[in-house]
Image (spheres, grey):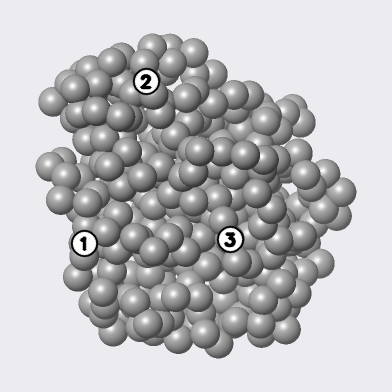
Amino acid sequence: MSVQFEDSFHRKFYYLRLSITDVCNFRCTYCLPEGYKPAGKNSGFLTLDELHRVVTAFSHCGTSKVRITGGEPTLRRDFTDVVAMIAAQDGIKKVAMTTNGYRLEKNAQQWRDAGLTNINVSVDSLDPRMFHQITGENKFHQVMRGIDAAFDAGFEQVKVNAVLLKNLNSGELPAFLNWIKDRPIQLRFIELMQTGDMDSLFEQHHQSGVSVRNHLIANGWIMKVRDQNDGPAEVFCHPDYQGEIGLIMPYKKDFCSSCNRLRVSALGKLHMCLFGDYGVDLRDLLQDNAQEEALVARIQGELLNKKQSHFLDQGHTGMTPHLASIGG
């Protein structure tokens, strides 16, 4: 193994979020309310060979978990090949994906057979009408069948992401808790994060996760210990529930102190942070296997510039226009 990726604050990076497309077929209010629009000319998304070189370099530098993101990653025709390629890499223990779930019902078994180990599905409401309002798509029941299909395919747990939205889904905690009582679902409430394209929506619908956290603790939920390649969620369990609750609260003090993940966009740019000010082009070093040493050196060099925090609590949103642009 090459030198473990580490920044100047001694944070080690075990987790790669790898976007393979920024295209999405949903129109979520907090991400792409007007639908997907290509951002000018580009040379196309990373090819399978280029993705292979990214994953190989990261695996050689201590990365043990890769999450495939988008946009909606399953829109790529070679999605199953991407999963299989990552799963075949030495040192990669977890191959995860984040999806809106619309293709899950038909493909869950195929993806598991290819090597997918973990699934996150976005479900912002258990009310089909509210789901439609938030996502712009009337596909609630299709997504629910997809989650069932994932369990049928042998996934022991499915993570479900719900963005907390004041005055939209903020009153659904009892329904969500009832849903996971007898199902191995880790329900993750994510605070709405401010990006460049949605200042007014943030002001209208941002809700802190602290109230949910306080409710859980008051009702006997206990926080679990994090593994080194876990994401940023604070995860709670309860002896009376088969499911779990995760809270992602990016505005909480010291949220960034446990950062263990880097991002590579579908266009081959390295992003130190979801809310960073710039991306570093890696694509010129993804054309030949012999370039790996130079690729690793560029990534490690940029890590020395990684900031201690995203400074979201100070109103800084960086260059990110919307979450789909670099993989959420």
Image location (x, y in percent) of residue 106: 37, 82
Crowding at dot 3, Cα within 10 Å, few <14 / some 14-19 / many 20+, comes out as many
The Cα atoms of the two marked residues, 1 and 3, are separated by 23 Å
Is the residue 250 above or below the residue 24 in the image?
above
Marks 2/3: CA distance?
28 Å
- Circle 2 — which element? helix
Query: Disc 1 marks which residue?
Result: 115
Element marked by disc 3: loop
Q: Earlier in the sequence, mark 2 or mark 3?
A: 3
* 10 Å crowding of disc 1: few (<14), some (14-19), many (20+): many
Q: Earlier in the sequence, mark 1 or mark 3?
A: 3
Q: Are the residues flagged by discs 1 and 3 in contact, CB closer than 8 Å?
A: no
In this orientation, does residue 121 appear?
yes
Task: Give the labeled residue for mark 3.
Answer: 24
| Residue name at image x 46 percent, y 45 percent | 45
| Amino acid type shown at disc 1 | Gly
Q: How many marks?
A: 3
In the rendered view, tell whether residue 19 sits above or below residue 262: below
**Badge 2 vs badge 3, beta-carbon distance below 8 Å:** no
Report the amino acid beneath label 2.
Ile
**Measuring 31% from the left and 80% from the top, which residue is drawn there?**
151
Q: Is residue 181 left or right of residue 328?
A: left
Disc marking residue 299: 2
Of marks 2 and 3, the one in the foreground: 3
Mark 1 / mark 2, whichever is N-terminal: 1
Query: Is residue 45 or residue 172 the one in the foreground?
Result: 45
Residue 185 or residue 38, whichever sits in front: 38
Considering the numbered disc 1 on the image, is that residue within a helix, a strand or a loop?
loop
User: Which residue is found at the position 60% from the left and 82% from the top?
Assistant: 139
The amino acid type of the residue labelled 3 equals Cys
